[in-house]
Image (spheres, coloured by chain):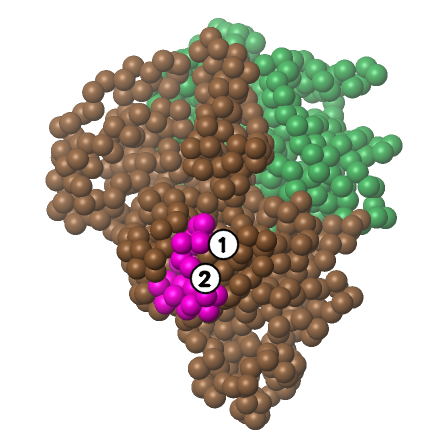
Chain colours: A green, B brown
Amino acid sequence: MPWKITKEDIRFISLGARILSCGGGGNTRSMEALILSVMKDDDVIEVIPIHEVRDDWWVTAIGIMGSTVLFNEDLPTGEEMETALSLYEKKYNKNVDALISIEIGGVNALAPLLLALKRRLPVIDGDGMGRAFPELYMTTLHLNGIPLAPLSLVTQDNMKFVPSSYTSDQAVHEAKSFANNNGGHSHVVGYGASGDEIKTSMLSGTLYLAYRLGKIITSYGDGIIRLKQIKNAFENSIYGELSLVIKGYVTEVSRWFENEVIVGKLFIESYTKQHNQKIEIQFMNEFFTIHNGESIYRVPDLIVFLHIDSLEPISVVDIQRAQSVIVLVIPAPNILHTTDMLTLIHMKESYQLLKKEEDQ
Amino acid sequence: MRLGIDVGGTNTDAVIIDDSGNIKAWSKQLTTSNLGETIYETAKIVLNEANVKPESMKGVFLGTTHVLNELYYPKNLAKTALIRLTKKPSKIKPGLFWPSHLSKYIIKEFHLETKYDFTRQIPHYDEIDHESVFKIMKELEKAKVESVCIVGAFSSFYEDEENNLKKVIASHMPSLSVTVSNEIGSIGFLDRENASLLNSMLSFVMKDALSSINDIFKNLGLHCPYWITQNDGSLMKVEEAIKLPIFTIGSGITNSLRGASKLTGLKNFIGIDVGGSTIDIGMVSHGHPQTEEGPVKVLDIPVNVRLPKVHSLSTGGGNLVNTHNGDLLIEDTIASDITKDGLAWGGEQWTISDSFLKIFPHSFKDKHIKYENLEGISTEDCLKVVNTVSSRIREKIRQLQPKDQYVPLVLVGGGSPLLLNNIFTKFDKAIQPVGYQICNAVGACYAPLSSSLDKVFWLNDRTKEEIVEREKERVITELIHKGAKPETIKINRVEEFPFDYLKGEMFRLKIMAFGDL
């Protein structure tokens, strides 16, 4: 279904994207504020569903990489994305016909929208991760052989173009060192491909799902009904069947540094005695494993924390002791469970804990 | 001997408590538009009644919901200008998620280029750009701006730039009040900006209410130190409260919960404070009211200041009830004085209290109540009101109540007799302590001193442990300086938050310590 995003819809997408972020993906506040500041009341952004993406289009993926904590402190001017796209088009000598989000989980769901609005380009209903992952290469686009480079990188006061002669590994390295040397974050335009290639590599329908989820959460209505609606929304998507793991309160949270990455652990005690008494959850950039007696849930399945009352998603940064939460697990789309994709996400040092766990 | 005063939206209470914790006397007066006068009158009555010498008073403890009420119903907000200190101007508009009755007070917005380079540990700081600042000041004058809010990117670890700009503006325009964001909140630009803007707008509110406080207490013969209670339930100096009014917006319920703990002797319970315009429900564990510091909202505005963890129902005993086309409505409006305007007291306004009194007569031991006045309203409607309000309260309690260890409910506040034995019975382990109607003032008397820190540090060749130890020392020294007994000082928590992507060269540190006077 072709669909037009209005100014009113932005907050729904923002909220829904934070659900799909599994606690990572960054606070969407600055990006949401930026779009709402720029968007006029009658502006719309055109969304193109998978079957209407034209094979001969040139599509690029859009995102922000690096620390979103720093991104939310270092206010964007609002022009960085346009600069990045212009740099890409000029250096690569190719016009872009449509945009797609690198990562639907968190701030990057919104990243292409501002650019789409300003350049009057359509946004494709889908993304490259189906959730949030910590690294630029952990995408189904990469998995399907779409090269990251050419890549354009832009911050408030610096820019860089990585030409197509760079392998994806080299491009990732360039992008990381650029972000590290320029305030810890950068706007990114890359993963350029034809519409044909994008269609077969992307996770489809995730933008609309984010919108639906946000809309459900903000609707009035009691918690149980809204939870049911959330379940329905996932049932009509590429994800698996949602299950409620626990309703309870956080009894303990600890965070520490391991391999230069923040790692943490928390415990939740159930409200009702019948349920599992106590579960343990580990997190890094996102929530990544649940130990629940016999059963274990883990990345790439979606582990989602919601505020017990408002059902607003809670991030790994904000989770704290004594919070009352609902924890959901949603099986990831099949493609994220393929051996190649699992290898891709386990390669990263930051998921070593996860690997250790599996070795045992 | 301690004197506690609570200035609420409807009533002002005062209480005198002796050194062994007994209530010597208390008084309750209607809060008038002249807060100084109200405080004076209420304190005078209680001092007379207790018949104690003002010299025997060790301290006066003042709590107020005045500032929060001002945000709901603005009367005295300052026209505020925002100055952003960032590398480049941002298209993000200030006041975006705000209700319009507050955002209209942001009347000007300026940008100054920061001299810092955030990517390096050691900033290259240059002189302030005086020319641009003078231009801004001209415009401030022209627009008749009353308050200025300075928000610099990364001010939680480069505070000098905000502070220096403040100095320049304050020296040229001494009548302006200036808020700097590094005193308000930590990392997270927009949330900090929101909190700082609110603080700026509130500049007159505390100043007007408290500027005469010195004289008032002198006139009462009180020469002891006096304090204001803040959001986390701890004490701040009057000068601090005038400068940082945003830190007092949540103090009302914190005082009430602490008071409930003192009056019942309980350390773990759910407190329900039934006031004129709200019912606040909060949790006390190990004797401390719980606070929340994640992303919190004040009137839907995201802010990054610490607030008590409270569920607030926007209906209290004074809310008006009406029927409209056959539908029953609980309105947002509140009777200004229920003992005059409420139906049961011979007034013209049908309130939530009247509805409860119709169903549960004699809840209040008040001779002035005439039950025949309630004959005109239907029992069925009143029952609906009672059911609506009580199911809202029950729902909140259900969420707070830990299942494995049922904690008692403590009912306080002037309206709480409406609930006791009617909605909540001994089966709910519901308790209403003696002194329930002056619980806030009691709580204020027992507020501790606190000192806290929430800053971001570059390691700069030091170890993390060195920095944590040094800052701990600093917090403790500050607490002793404020007047805390060293043996009572407890570091409540030390939390470190590493940053991603910066290889651990930078971290955020939160320290919180409490101590008794």
Q: In this orientation, which residue lies closer to the viewer: B233 or B351?
A: B233
Q: Give the residues drawn in magenta, as a range.
A: B38-67
Q: Disc 1 on helix, strand or loop?
A: loop
Q: Position of residue A307 (x, y in %)?
A: 63, 46
Q: Disc 1 marks which amino acid? A: Met
Asked if residue A227 is positioned above or below residue B320 in the image, the reply reads above
Seen at 36% across and 24% down, the residue is: B158
The quadrant holding residue A34 is: top left
Q: Confirm or deny contact between disc 1 and disc 2 (CB under 8 A).
A: yes
In the rendered image, residue B43 lying in the magenta stretch gets the answer yes
- Whether residue A340 is visible, yes or no, is no
In the rendered image, residue A19 lying in the magenta stretch gets the answer no
Asked if residue B407 is positioned above or below residue B437 in the image, the reply reads above
- N-terminal label among 1 and 2: 1
Q: Is residue B500 left or right of residue B179?
A: right
Residue under pointer 1: B1
Task: Specify the label residue B52 is tagged with.
Answer: 2
Q: Is residue B455 left or right of residue B425?
A: left
Q: Position of residue B428 (x, y in %)?
A: 75, 64
